[in-house]
Image (cartoon, grey):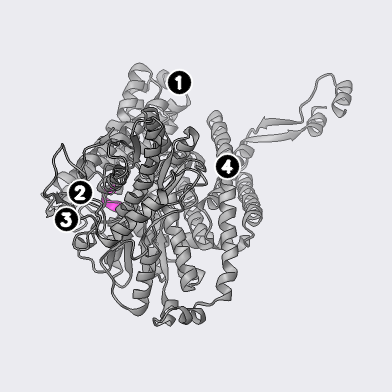
Amino acid sequence: MKKLLAVLLSLAMIFALAACGNDTPASTKASEEATTKAPETTQAPASTEAPATTDAPAANLSTIKLGFIFLHDPASSTYDNNFYQAALEVQKELGLKDDQFIFKWNVPEGPECQDTAEEMADAGCNIVFADSFGHETYMIEAAKNYPNVQFCHATGTQSRTVGVANFHNAFASIYEGRYLAGIAAGMKLAELVKNGATPKIGYVGAFPYAEVVSGFTSFFLGVKSIVPEVTMDVVYTNSWFDIALEKEAALKLINDGCVLISQHADSEGAPKACEEKGIPNVAYNVSTINLGPTTAIISSKINWAPYYKLIIEAVAKGETFATDWCGNFSTGSVELTELNAAAAAPGTQEAIDKAMAELKAGTLHVFDTKNWTVKGETLKEYLADVQDMGDFQPETNVIIDGVFVESGDDFRSAPYFDIRIDGITEK
Amino acid sequence: MSEAKDNSTQKLHEPLLHIVKRAGISRPKAWLIRLLAILLALVLNALIIYWLTGLNPIAVYKTMIDGSFSTKRKFWVLLQNTAMLLCIALAVTPAFKMRFWNLGAEGQVLIGALSSGALMFYIGDKLPSGVLILLMLVCALISGIIWAGIPALFKARFGTNETLFTLMMNYVAIQLVNTMIAVWVPSGSGVLGIMNSKTNTGWLPTIFGQKYAINIIVVAVLTVFMFIYLKYSKHGYEIAVVGESENTARYIGINVRKVVIRTAALSGCIAGLAGFLLMAGSAHTVSSTIAGGNGFTAVLVSWLAKFNPFVMVLTSALIEFLQKGAGEIAQAFRLSNDIADIATGIILFFIIGSEFFINYRVIFRHKAHKEGK
């Protein structure tokens, strides 16, 4: 008994020390942010500043209160940080005060999510936003209990079918951003192949789920548009966020001969592994140039600020807004981060610009069936599970005029491309 | 220099401090030490918070209290979280009292939630809710018993180490949960989500307008039961004797094997109940993280309370209060959760540390020297 107590004590001490060691910079950073933020908002009170910038009935903005539910801490999760930074940007742009926001980190995908959402509603929030796929059903329950509060959920699939008017989904046509990031990867791969490398790339995926499959397929098609003979291995971590597993998966791919890595997983594990091994990396959500100064090429990301602004302005005016919203290039929701000249191949920016222009003009479609096959065949039609009735039954043909229409306005914002195409091998 | 001098006057080198086991300590004095420890922790925390963030520590502490008490809902959530943690702590307590180191409560909870969830998944729409709930309960209890019983059987028959065995059973349970979710959710998202949200079959009813009320009542009753069971029943006595000395137990005619298996099964059974309460009473889903590490925190709760179920109410409430407070601080001041975790870590550290000073006395060199003469 004494021994175990001693072990407990020493463990507690180790944890306490480890916690101090790791976390002090993050927390001080956060506090710096908080302190630097304060003066700005006192200088520019929302009610006087806003009318100058927007023509909407801006006085109403002072009635807005937003609650944000994050799965992880933005200090360590690139995924959550992307949502957080966009919120700070919108706060600044619309001149909202600090007390018009509630941020809650580390909210698990369980009853805590509903409790937190309802606590936010209690605290006077008229918009509650949750950022993780697994939060969805708990947000729906909260929405049923608070019909006058708008509950918005990123990446979810059920708003069109669940029949709860104040529950909303949102996503963006990120597959187009991934395609462009794939072009940057393709340019790099072409350069490597010219120097004798095999055109084989690797991808660290989270779950074998449509959002991930759509992401890696569009990335692959971007690469393929530059290097037609490319093949890709995919390794799943079966977790959205696991630094060690993601790093391990990236190292496995590198050992298997992949000469370029990309990932759909929320941590910094894979970019760090790539920097250690000197393997070029294309990332997601945030720029990883600081993690891989010589290997990080570019990242595609969803900018959530346009959506936040849309819902804030709608609620301020007392208007309704989309049950299911999909952002794209034109709304400013799909972006690429800064291209790292130290890692990218020459001519990359030009290639990206050209493809972006074609995508915007509608002359290029990422999932054009001409560009991919399944077991050597070109698909003529494909039923996808667009209407999420909880039955996982595909019901809607999404190949229209030779193009797989992903995240279409008539279908659903969350991706449903779950076809395994030729050239990609799941390990 | 002084050491050399000491050595010249004394033949034996005497260490700076002695640690001496206390023969006994009066209850008020023990509580005084605990109170002092908490006060010290609060002061140290205040200094650290001020040093790292420049925030007013009093305001920070006020926010911490707000985390659990500023609204009715927050208070109910505190009660619910406390009840869940307490339930698992009650599960590990008889085993720990018997020195059967059941570190597998996490897995036992998961398997209880998984098996009752399986019923909801497969026959949720075929039975009336009441019958389904009863079946779910039975299923959860049995699977909890099996999950704790396997390591207990192996210990009783082959003398295997139950610490490692129960720990390993956690990973088996986690993988089983992940596998079943992959089977149940063909889209591959790995997220099951709330089950039966339209029909609410298999959900415990809301009473007094509170969805968590039944969970809380069940655990309150269980607490009283466990107190009586451990203190006044024959089983409780046997557990205490086996825990103190197996040889004594054998000598007075206790069937040690039987007691070990029976107690471990009880332990698993209650953990299974916690799994059932999660499934039917709060989460209505299962995932590998749904127990939230409470299977391990429960060990701390039980130990801090010296296996007294009523004191465990306090320790589990304290831990939940600290966690909710930590979240509230992070939210109110836009800090990373880490700073709040440091603060709660320090408080727990001091509370555990105070037990050391309750059990031991520290005597400094001069004093010992004088006392020695």
Q: Left or right: A258 with respect to B181?
A: right
User: Which mark is nearer the camera, 3 or 2?
Assistant: 3
Q: Left or right: A375 with respect to B255?
A: left
Label 4 vs label 2: CA separation?
42 Å
Where residue B145 appears, x then y in whole percent?
28, 33
**Circles 3 and 4: CB atoms closer than 8 Å:** no
- Where disc 3 sits, the SS reads loop
- Where disc 4 sits, the SS reads helix
Task: Look at mark 2 in the image and give the residue it sits on.
Answer: B133
**Circles 1 and 3: CB atoms closer than 8 Å:** no
Residue B366 occupies quadrant: top right
Task: Look at mark 4 in the image and give the residue it sits on.
Answer: A16
Q: Which mark is residue A204?
A: none
Label 3 amino acid?
A: Met
Chain for numbered disc 1: B
Label 1 amino acid?
A: Thr
Where residue A239 appears, x then y in whole percent?
35, 42
Label 4 amino acid?
A: Ala
Where residue A242 appears, x then y in whole percent?
41, 41
Q: Main secondary structure of the magenta part?
A: helix
Task: Look at mark 1 in the image and give the residue it sits on.
Answer: B248
Residue A329 occupies quadrant: bottom left
User: Is-magenta flag for residue B282?
Assistant: yes
Location of the C terminus of chain A by quadrant is top left
Please say whether residue B343 is visible from this viewpoint: no
Question: Which of the pair B170/B337 is nearer the observer?
Answer: B337
Label 1 vs label 2: CA separation?
43 Å
Report the magenta residues as a range. B279-284
Residue drawn at x 52%, y 54% is B336
